[in-house]
Image (cartoon, helix red, strand yellow):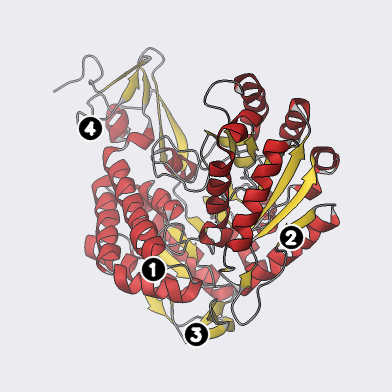
Amino acid sequence: METVLIDGRWQPSREQVGSFRAENPATGEAIGPEFPVSGAADVELALTSAAAAAPALADTDPERIAAFLDTYASGIDAAAGDLCALANEETALGVKPRLRDVELPRTVNQLRLAAQAARSRTWTQPVIDTQAGLRSLFAPLGKPVAVFGPNNFPLAFNAVSGGDFAAAIAARNPVIAKAHPAHPQTCRELAKLAHAALNKVHLPTATVQMLYHMPAELGLKLASDRRMGAVAFTGSRAGGLALKAAADKAGVPLYAEMSSINPVFMLPGALAERGAEIAREFAASCLAGSGQFCTNPGVVIVPADETGDAFVQAAREAFEAAPAGTLLARSVLDHLQQSVSALRGAGAEVLCGGNPAGAPAFRFQPTLLVTDATRFAADAPALQQEAFGPVSLIVRADGDAAMESVAQSFEGNLTGTIYSARDGQDDMLARRIASALRPRVGRLLNDRMPTGVAVSAAMNHGGPYPATGHPGFTSVGLPASIRRFAALECYDHVREDRLPPELRDRNPDGRLQRCIDGVWTTADVAGASA
């Protein structure tokens, strides 16, 4: 039985309430060793240890935090071959290009960008009002952060290596990582590298802890413990809402990425101009990674005219010609079948696919469904539920007003996309659709599919409910993502020597941007002593 990382060391579970093994999605067979399902004693020890480490970590020099993140990134880079081989076996995601050329470099880059943010302290946003005697900044929570990792990014969103993890550590908070049971061996190896990096830079040993799996009720208990500073979750809407309800009762902030269908509007002029090209882009985007991206184009609004007919036919041919991709896990296949059945029950018709592709692999046929704008607007909640996989719903809209009506009926999403003509003939309609989409999406795109999330300071990987639990935060993009795991602290006429370094009269490194009396500057406070 594998050990868990709790209280600074790898040790047997103190209360094992079950066990599990990973499954190879390509064969359906159990693989690797047995991993423990942790009981209440493991969760309590992790909480106690993290809470004890939090004050020391909050007072740690940012340079040591940066050193940990950089050292960890280098360790992942050095172990790239083994990590990608394990992740491939547990998820069926391709080693090349997906894991080795895209996801692993992104993981390393995120950690290094988090190190830069920790070192520069830009995320603290110091504000100094010399007239009022007030000074404020974002600071560590002084409490642990729990990170619940998803199944679709075994490296870049992993609970012990992904963006949430990097942001929480950069803000100098201990992390209790809840691994995803679909890829426990990958999580174990990442946690070993993180633990080695901790020891090398001499951070508190409980800075990083990891539990492989736990009963659902213990996950709720962890999220609702008042010793927690915050919780980050990426996964299903049902799971995210259950955790949010538990966390809300205890006043624990929870940042959840839960569900998104990412509407794509195909305007008439665009399809007349380059409909076949756009159809190929759509099929490639929807079927990439077997459709298992949170930014997968899950609903496409298409004119009910000849250009729309041609687009639908081209998309259908591309879907029918594509092989059935392997899904990440048995549970993904089960949920996808339920989602397609629910869409059909709400009145959507299957154009192609619609069924599992046969055992032993966890595969599902590339699937297109269709409905019209009137039905969609009348039963929008039922027809805009997420089908996580190679599935998309086409909505046929008869005229501009019908397109606008559909746009106005969407729930919150991570992204919204508009394809318009290059000669300007769609511009007026595009503006109206954009106006309807803007308060409903975190990221608005023009003339490109939403799949893919750049790691950029300008990126918003968030959005209104139910895409996430709060529209004001992002899980990708540093330093903005760090502020989810920070507290805004204010100091009122506090003596200079009792202030955090970022708020003292002298700029701590001469480079930190601080807002002094309404002006962002790297200067010292006027009159600062040498």
> Local crowd at mark 1 within 10 Å, few (<14), some, or many (≥20)?
many
Per the image, the residue denoted by label 1 is 95
Q: What residue type is labelled 4?
A: Pro
- Between 318 and 201, the residue placed more toward the observer is 318
Q: What is the distance, in whole Å, between disc 3 and disc 4 at their CAs?
A: 52 Å
Q: What element carries label 1?
A: helix
Instruction: Please report whichever mark, 2 or 1, sits nearer to the chain's N-terminal start.
Output: 1
Per the image, the residue denoted by label 2 is 339
Instruction: Please report whichever mark, 4 or 1, sits nearer to the chain's N-terminal start.
Output: 1
- Image height of 530 relative to 150, above or below: above
Kindly identify which numbered label has been placed on residue 508. 4
Position of the C terminus by quadrant: top left
> Local crowd at mark 4 within 10 Å, few (<14), some, or many (≥20)?
some
**Position of residue 244 measured from the top left corner of the image (x, y, whole percent):** 66, 51
Kindly identify which numbered label has been placed on residue 491. none
Give the quarter of the image for residue 220.
bottom right
Q: What is the distance, in whole Å, between disc 3 and disc 2 at their CAs?
A: 28 Å
In this view, the mark in front (4 or 2): 2
Instruction: Please report whichever mark, 1 or 3, sits nearer to the chain's N-terminal start.
Output: 3
